[in-house]
Image (cartoon, rainbow, N blue to C red):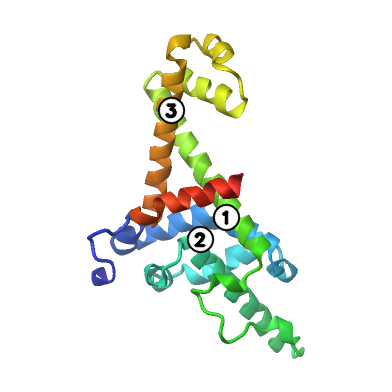
Amino acid sequence: MPEIFPTTHATWLERTLVDDPPAARAHVMQRYFEPLCAYARASSLRVLGEPAELVNDFLASRLVGDDYLARWPDSGLPLRRWLANGLFIHARNTALAARRRDRLAPRADDIPPESIAATRAAEHETDALLALERAWAIRTVTEAHEQVRTELDAEGRSAWWELFRLHTVHGMPYAQAAPATGVPLTSASSVHRQVVDRLRGALRAILARDGIRADDIDRELALMQDALG
């Protein structure tokens, strides 16, 4: 199996799929459960059952072994899109199988076209893909924020994070945010810029960890900004 993922340019997730498959599966389940639920909730799959149940069934079925995730790097898709495609096909096929077992004639629109493949995201509704992207972006940004906030707290720089929060999230001018946090007004702009730089670095590291190639990270960051805009 190691030859499937050459170590050169392999991402953390790709290496972990080889070195520690259970850890890779646990990471995928924890990281992508909520975005996949958002996708199911906004797609036609919502008529087939509760989103959380559909996603749990899909993950339990597909991640029970190592083979499913091992096929992802060759798809050329971001992992979130590849998983959404798999969820779409799995849920529709499961519903069709249930109808057959119950000896009910399935409607034509219940049957996924034979041409649907795990690498074709275009088959899905635009709203569902937008929901997927937004939930994934929120999940990623939240993780980056928590990481940087924790680092600053450990360094005794909690005031830096508070200045960033007040200025960026709440729109408070430096003239008010600096006295409120104890950061010198003359340093406020520099402190804010350093926190922003740390956040960018954390986001890039998270994307790289999750299988986004270095050449694609800037494009992914732009997509995230659009999704959250």
Which residue shows up at 40% across the image and 51% down it? 217
Label 1, on which residue?
A: 133
Q: CA distance from mark 1 to mark 2?
A: 8 Å
From this view, report whether residue 115 is shown above or below residue 166: below
Horizontal and vertical percent for residue 7?
A: 23, 61
Q: Which mark is residue 80?
A: 2
From this view, report whether residue 102 is shown above or below residue 209: below
Horizontal and vertical percent for residue 212?
A: 39, 56
The answer to whether mark 1 and mark 2 are in CB contact below 8 A is yes
Q: Nearer the viewer, mark 2 or mark 3?
A: 3
| Amino acid type indicated by mark 3 | Val
- Which quarter of the picture shows residue 147? top left
Q: Is 155 on the left or on the right of 47, as rendered? A: left
Which residue shows up at 52% across the image and 12% down it? 178
Q: CA distance from mark 3 to mark 1?
A: 25 Å
| Amino acid type indicated by mark 1 | Glu
Q: Which mark is residue 195?
A: 3
| Amino acid type indicated by mark 2 | Arg
Q: Earlier in the sequence, mark 2 or mark 3?
A: 2
**Callout 2 secondary element:** helix
The answer to whether mark 2 and mark 3 are in CB contact below 8 A is no
